[in-house]
């Protein structure tokens, strides 16, 4: 067990090292670091001073070590556009992204499980077929196109909901959130639904497959034979047993919800990390790009590591499989 | 006695059993034809500035231009015919999707076969790479690469290849390991055939059916991802507008009620993706040996 965790840790460090090398090569070796790290509006004397200060006259491998040391101490340069440290800028935008991702996950779960149960309990009825067709569309249609259609219908055509932005926020334990005010909720609905669609389709399919399998099991037949009500059989016996894979997938997929928030945030002008990175790429605000890439990849490596460790604790077969390889 | 059908005939017959799949195939053929012959069938060359007139900009569908041309699907901010723009955009979208899928297929095939055939350390290293790659969402990998490399059609194709190859490698390895243990490979070994001949003439053809299915699905996924990246402004450059970029260009007008500039390219994109998926779905059923009668 400790050997397994140590091996996973080493692997995570390797991936992170590779990522930092990729970002370093991309930003320092291919692009001109003077353009990238020094504000283009600086004058000649400033540029010369900055080149010396950044050590750009040193050999490449030494520059890479310096870049790593600065990155590890949390110094990734100042944003050109906002003139504050890039890391601080990204951390400021993080709560908005997390709020959107959590709301989307909640929407996917609260809609997906009942719809999946319905489709699994009466697989031949027309609502079930409608739900399954919808879930196929949810898988195959591009998220950004669905987002545009939502804006076109609910913001432009009917005018019920705002087309973008976050609206007024309320402070909750020092963090600005939208969901405490009616105006904030109105701004949250469309982006959250848009981001939820893919996960919703996934949860519907998982729930349906699990329900259909569980209905054939002996414990369900036994519960029915005991004369329990249908609501109790489905709500307690079936639901409890299909929740394990669903909870696992929701946990595993949370990282990808954050990744796909890039698209949703850009469409709905939601002021989170995802919109920040796209805006930064468009105006070549490179310190922010570098900081975002390193932070998001680190977050993913941590999520993957945590999932692997939790799995190996819960399921000994994972460890055996890793040893046999 | 009934004549024995060739495999291709059997696949064609089985495929035709689903009307939905046939409709998907017909739609896909139409889309590919429209993309291939875009310069011939487009009412206007949308990238020839001499044919454009500012007075024609943002006209609703069905209006007539200054030079007497009918804009069936309206015109965009520069006075370009949306229909012509869609035909030309389809070319770029399909080209990027098909090229990236093909490259990824070849790379994934080579990696997967190598992992399965050599086993041991080679297998361990390749599959670790695949695992790491698959633990990141596709959009994140593409974003990292394009943020570092910058915009461009070639770079977009490269990013899509990097996103996709691992799927093929994993599938090929799994199939090849099952096939490797079968008698016909053993027989080929007993005949003292060279490893290259065994891999390419015996092992490879038998690994193809699941690959064809994945490749079809992946073309649709690649087209969708390319459109998403281009919509975000980090995919193809503005000089080679794919459907995603056309949709992006119309987004601001959409908020003021001029829906057609974004809407129709979006419909073209969705029809393309859905038709590819319908064909892929039926191919999966037809090529799955477990479902064969």
Image (cartoon, coloured by chain):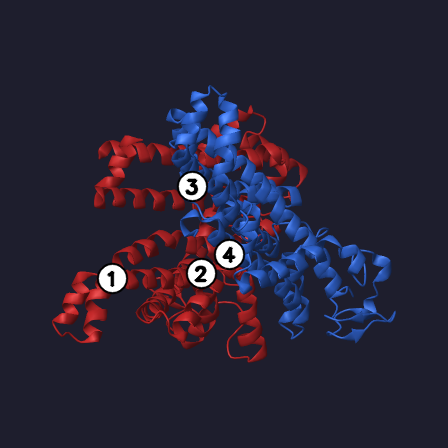
Chain colours: A red, B blue
Q: Residue at x 42, y 38 (%)?
A: B175
Q: Comparing marks 1 and 4, which lies closer to the viewer?
A: 4
Indicate which disc residue B282 carries: 4
N-term mark: 3 or 2: 3
Q: Mark 4 against mark 2, which lies toward the viewer? A: 4
Give the secondary structure at mark 2.
Answer: helix
In the rendered structure, the answer to whether residue A152 lies left or right of residue A13 reads right
Say above or below: B51 vs A85: below
Quadrant of the image containing the C terminus of chain A: top left
Q: CA distance from mark 1 to mark 4?
A: 28 Å
Which of the labelled discs sits on residue A198, or is there none? 2
Q: Position of residue B100 (x, y in %)?
A: 59, 43
- The residues bearing labels 3 and 4 have C-alpha atoms spaced at a distance of 52 Å
Q: Relative to residue B59, is residue A84 depicted above or below?
A: above
Q: Would residue A21 be visible to someone looking at this image?
A: no
Foreground residue, B1 or B19? B1
The chain letter for the residue carrying disc 3 is A
Q: Say which quarter of the image contains residue A59.
A: top right
Q: Measure the C-alpha gap from mark 2 to mark 1.
A: 24 Å
Q: Which residue is mark 3?
A: A74
Count of numbered circles on the image = 4
Contact? badges 1 and 3 (CB < 8 Å) = no
Q: CA distance from mark 4 to mark 2?
A: 22 Å
At x 45%, y 56%, the residue is A93
Which element carries disc 3, helix, strand or loop? loop
Give the mark toward the camera: 3 or 4: 4
Q: Secondary structure at mark 1?
A: helix
Tag 4, which secondary structure? Answer: helix
Do badges 2 and 1 share one subunit? yes
Q: Residue at x 45, y 74 (%)?
A: A186
Residue wearing tag 1 = A214
């Amino acid at each position: 067990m400790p050997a397994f965790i140590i091996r996973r840790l080493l692997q995570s460090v390797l991936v992170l090292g590779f990522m930092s090398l990729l970002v370093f090569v991309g930003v320092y070796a291919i692009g001109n670091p003077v353009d990238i790290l020094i504000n283009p509006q600086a004058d000649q004397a400033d540029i010369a001073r900055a080149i010396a200060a950044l050590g750009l006259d040193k050999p490449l491998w030494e520059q890479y070590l310096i870049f790593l040391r600065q990155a590890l101490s949390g110094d990734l340069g100042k944003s050109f556009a906002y003139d504050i440290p890039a890391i601080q800028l990204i951390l400021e935008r993080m709560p908005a992204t997390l709020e959107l991702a959590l709301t989307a996950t909640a929407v996917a779960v609260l809609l997906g499980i009942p719809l999946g149960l319905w489709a699994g309990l009466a697989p031949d009825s027309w609502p079930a077929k409608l739900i399954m067709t919808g879930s196929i569309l949810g898988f195959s249609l591009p998220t950004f196109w669905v987002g545009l259609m939502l804006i076109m219908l609910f913001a432009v055509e009917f005018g019920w909901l705002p087309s973008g932005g976050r609206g007024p926020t309320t402070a909750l334990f020092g963090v600005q959130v939208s969901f405490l005010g009616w105006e904030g909720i109105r701004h949250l609905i469309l982006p959250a639904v848009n981001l939820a669609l893919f996960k919703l389709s996934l949860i519907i399919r998982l729930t349906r497959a699990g329900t259909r399998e569980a209905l054939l099991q002996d414990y369900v037949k036994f519960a029915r034979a005991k004369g329990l009500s249908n609501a109790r059989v489905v709500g307690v016996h079936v639901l409890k047993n299909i929740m394990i894979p669903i909870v696992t997938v929701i946990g595993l997929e949370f990282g990808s919800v954050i990744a796909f928030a890039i698209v949703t945030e850009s469409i709905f002008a939601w002021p989170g990390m995802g919109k920040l990175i796209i805006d930064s790429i468009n105006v070549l605000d490179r310190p922010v790009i570098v900081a975002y890439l390193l932070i998001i990849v680190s977050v993913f490596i941590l999520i993957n590591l945590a999932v692997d460790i939790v799995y190996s604790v819960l399921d000994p077969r994972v460890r055996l499989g890793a040893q046999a390889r | 006695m009934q004549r024995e059908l060739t495999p291709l005939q059997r696949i064609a017959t089985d495929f035709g059993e689903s009307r939905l799949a046939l409709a998907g195939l017909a739609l896909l053929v139409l889309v590919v034809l429209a993309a291939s012959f875009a310069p011939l069938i487009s009412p206007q060359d949308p990238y020839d500035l001499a044919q454009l007139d500012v007075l024609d900009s943002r006209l609703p569908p069905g209006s007539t231009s200054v030079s007497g041309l009918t804009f069936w699907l309206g015109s965009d901010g520069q006075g370009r015919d949306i229909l012509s723009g869609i035909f030309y955009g389809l070319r770029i979208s399909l080209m990027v999707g098909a090229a990236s899928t093909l490259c990824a297929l070849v790379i994934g095939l080579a990696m997967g076969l190598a992992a399965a055939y050599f086993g041991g350390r080679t297998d361990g290293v390749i599959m670790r790479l695949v695992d790491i790659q698959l633990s990141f969402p596709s959009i994140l990998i593409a974003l990292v690469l394009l943020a570092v490399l910058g915009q461009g059609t070639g770079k977009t194709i490269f990013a899509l290849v990097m996103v996709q190859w691992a799927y093929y490698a994993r599938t090929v390895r799994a199939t090849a390991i099952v096939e490797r243990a079968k008698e016909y490979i053993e027989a080929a070994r007993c005949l003292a055939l060279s490893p290259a001949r065994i891999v390419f003439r015996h092992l490879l053809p038998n690994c193809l059916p699941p690959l064809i299915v994945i490749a079809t699905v992946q073309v649709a996924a690649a087209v969708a991802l390319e459109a998403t990246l281009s919509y975000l402004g980090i995919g193809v450059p503005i000089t080679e507008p794919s459907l995603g970029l056309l949709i992006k260009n119309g987004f601001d007008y959409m908020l003021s009620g001029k829906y057609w500039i974004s809407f129709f390219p979006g419909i073209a994109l969705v029809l393309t993706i859905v038709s590819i998926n319908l064909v892929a779905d039926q191919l999966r059923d037809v090529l799955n040996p477990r479902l064969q009668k």
